Amino acid sequence: MNSEITIIMDSNSENESFARLSVAAFVSRLNPTVEEINDIKTAVSEAVTNAIIHGYSDKNGKIYLMCKIIEREVVIQIKDYGIGIDDIKKAMEPLYTSKPDMERSGIGFTVMETFMDKIFVESRKDYGTTVTMTKNLIAS
Amino acid sequence: MQINASGKNLIVKIDGDIDHHVSMQIKEKIEREFKLLNCANIIFDFSNVKFMDSSGIGMIIGRYKMLEKLGGKIYITNVNEKLNSIIEISGLKKIIGFYDSVEKALKN
């Protein structure tokens, strides 16, 4: 059965674990493999962390997390109304980080691309960023 | 998280997930204890870590760079298979030694 959840949360770093565990709990009805659930948790963690430290630059803001199950496809959307990304192509380059002083590895988008099947990033300067990711789970 | 010193080695045993929130706490604690206990190297024990994202990778690379300046070394031990993919993507194995146990890392 198809189903959907939406969570609106503050951009606190404590919510990174809440976000990935909520999505993992919601998706568990599809009996994903250990690897699939780990991939999804990691991708959610990356996107929510980006919203907190880049989108809102550690200031207060709301993060909108939507997760939809369509048969065995999982669609996850993470949206912020923060500063937006100037150059999406550059932001998605492996090892690129706009905050080198913060010990960022610069592989967040690479991880999302590798662990999910598809990723789509929409962003507008001063309006925010939306990351949409999908993953098809193997038949249970 | 438990931090102990064995000679010049700071042994950092982390419990639970390593994300951006936790990485900031780990970083602060290591920097304090490293100076306090007068250590030269860092050995991470990941036996109780079942999740890590790229913030954890950033935290490890940060400690690697810190030790590189001081002439010390960093070792990672007891990595769970759930962490394999993120570690492979990061390329950490090219710069850091991985061992099955803290004892094996201490011998090197």
Image (cartoon, rainbow, N blue to C red):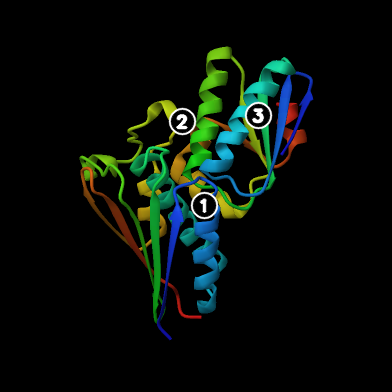
Residue A105: percent from left, percent from top = 43, 36
Q: Please state if A7 lies on the left or on the right of B25 as rendered.
A: left
> Which of the 4 image quarters holds residue A68?
bottom left
Viewer-proximal residue, B20 or A9?
A9
Of labels 3 and 2, the one closer to you = 3
Marks 1/2: CA–CA distance: 20 Å
Q: Please state if B21 lies on the left or on the right of A8 as rendered.
A: right
Q: Are marks 3 and 2 in contact (CB under 8 Å)?
A: no
Identify the residue position indicated by label 1 in the image: A15
Q: Are marks 3 and 1 in contact (CB under 8 Å)?
A: no
Which amino acid type corresponds to the residue marked 2 in the rendered image? Glu
Q: Residue at x 51, y 72 (%)?
A: A26
Q: Residues within 10 Å of mark 3 (few under 14, many from 20)?
A: some
The number of numbered discs placed on residues in the rendered structure image is: 3
Residue closest to the far bottom: A1
* Residue B29, numbered circle: 3
